[in-house]
């Protein structure tokens, strides 16, 4: 635990110049890394390449790249290429995502641990005929359940968790072991108006609320089916989203750190309703 933080943000709504400014400003504020998610917008490795070429210190990660979206051989090529050309500032974040994403790519869904293990096997066994990077690119696995966390302990540099309470962080650390990096994403909304903050939080949860994998985890950590109704209960939003003053948001981050997180990745939620724009008040407030 080094005190630095990362940012995970849906950059697809930013045009090229604002995107470059966003990354440079994060670098100036001292953030360790920027994570680029993958849905149905920009191809993430292309975006990562753009960002690495326009920054000098910031690490840039796929956060996460969907293993159903491209074969593992291509990912092995991208991993080595970006590591070499960025002088080691690239991080490969991988995740199995969810059945709808596999279906969208026309690929049958497979058991998550078996799918990820086979994907890592191919990456590790692939010879890429290009110059060696200064150091190998670390791999972080999106992992919530014990199977993927054990796989991250065995085969990766660390694990990423998302939309989980501090109690899950404690268990994840126990499964992952003391040596591996545990990155905990904390959705955060710098807003002391409870009604507005919860409305913003519900909007952020909306895409995940129907997914069975998240629901199973949330039930395990004390939530009930009634918490998933009507866009999510106040209890669910309050348990998964850090909102309120800077002090209150930092307290939630500290809870995760005390529970065993190595690193916090801030997912900034904007209560000012400015479309895809990041909430700079929050990012400036919690940078260090």
Image (cartoon, rainbow, N blue to C red):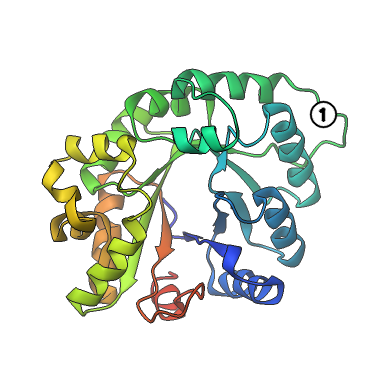
- Against 82, is 252 above or below? below
Mark 1, other Cα within 10 Å: few <14 / some 14–19 / many ≥20: some
What residue is at 76 percent from the left and 50 percent from the top? 87
- Image quarter where the C terminus lies is bottom left
Can residue 244 be seen at all in this image of the molecule?
no
Image: 91 above or below 42: above
Circle 1: element type: loop
* 118 sits to left or right of 187: right
Identify whether 173 is placed above or below 229: above
* Residue 213 seen anywhere in this rendered image of the structure: yes
Q: Position of residue 159 (x, y in %)?
A: 45, 38
User: Residue 2, how many percent across, how many down?
Assistant: 44, 55
The picture quadrant where one finds residue 113 is: top left
- In depth, the one of 163 and 229 nearer the eye is 229
Which residue in the structure is indicated by mark 1?
Answer: 128
Count of numbered marks: 1
Identity of the residue drawn at 75% across and 22% down:
126
| Relative depth, front residue between 139 and 70 | 70
Residue 200 lies in quadrant: bottom left
Q: Which residue is found at the position 61% from the left and 56% from the top?
A: 41
In the displayed structure image, the side of residue 245 where residue 73 appears, left or right: right
Describe residue 114's horizontal placement relative to residue 70 as left or right.
left
Give me the residue at 41% from left, 27% from top. Answer: 148
């Amino acid at each position: 635990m080094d005190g630095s933080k990362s940012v995970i943000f849906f950059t697809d709504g930013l045009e090229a110049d604002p995107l470059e400014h966003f990354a440079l400003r994060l670098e100036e504020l001292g953030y360790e890394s920027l994570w680029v998610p993958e849905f149905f917008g920009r191809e993430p490795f292309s975006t990562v390449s753009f960002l690495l070429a326009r920054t000098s210190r910031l690490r840039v990660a796929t956060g996460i790249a969907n293993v159903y979206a491209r074969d593992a051989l291509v990912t092995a090529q991208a991993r080595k290429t970006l590591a070499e050309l960025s002088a080691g500032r690239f991080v490969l974040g991988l995740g199995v995502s969810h059945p709808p994403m596999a279906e969208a790519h026309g690929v049958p869904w497979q058991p998550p641990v078996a799918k990820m293990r086979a994907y890592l096997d191919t990456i590790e066994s692939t010879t890429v005929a290009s110059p060696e990077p200064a150091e190998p690119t670390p791999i972080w696995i999106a992992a919530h359940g014990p199977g993927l966390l054990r796989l991250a302990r065995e085969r990766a540099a660390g694990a990423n968790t998302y939309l989980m309470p501090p109690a899950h962080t404690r268990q994840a650390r126990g499964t992952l072991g003391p040596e591996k990096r545990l990155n905990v994403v904390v959705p955060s909304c710098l807003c002391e108006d409870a009604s507005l903050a919860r409305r913003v939080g519900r909007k952020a949860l909306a895409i995940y609320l129907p997914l069975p994998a998240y629901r199973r985890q949330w039930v395990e950590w004390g939530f009930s089916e009634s918490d998933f109704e009507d866009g999510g209960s106040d209890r669910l939003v309050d348990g998964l989203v850090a909102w309120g003053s800077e002090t209150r948001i930092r307290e939630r981050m500290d809870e995760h750190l005390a529970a065993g997180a190595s690193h916090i990745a801030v997912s900034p939620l904007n209560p000012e309703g400015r479309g895809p724009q990041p909430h700079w008040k929050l990012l400036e407030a919690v940078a260090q």
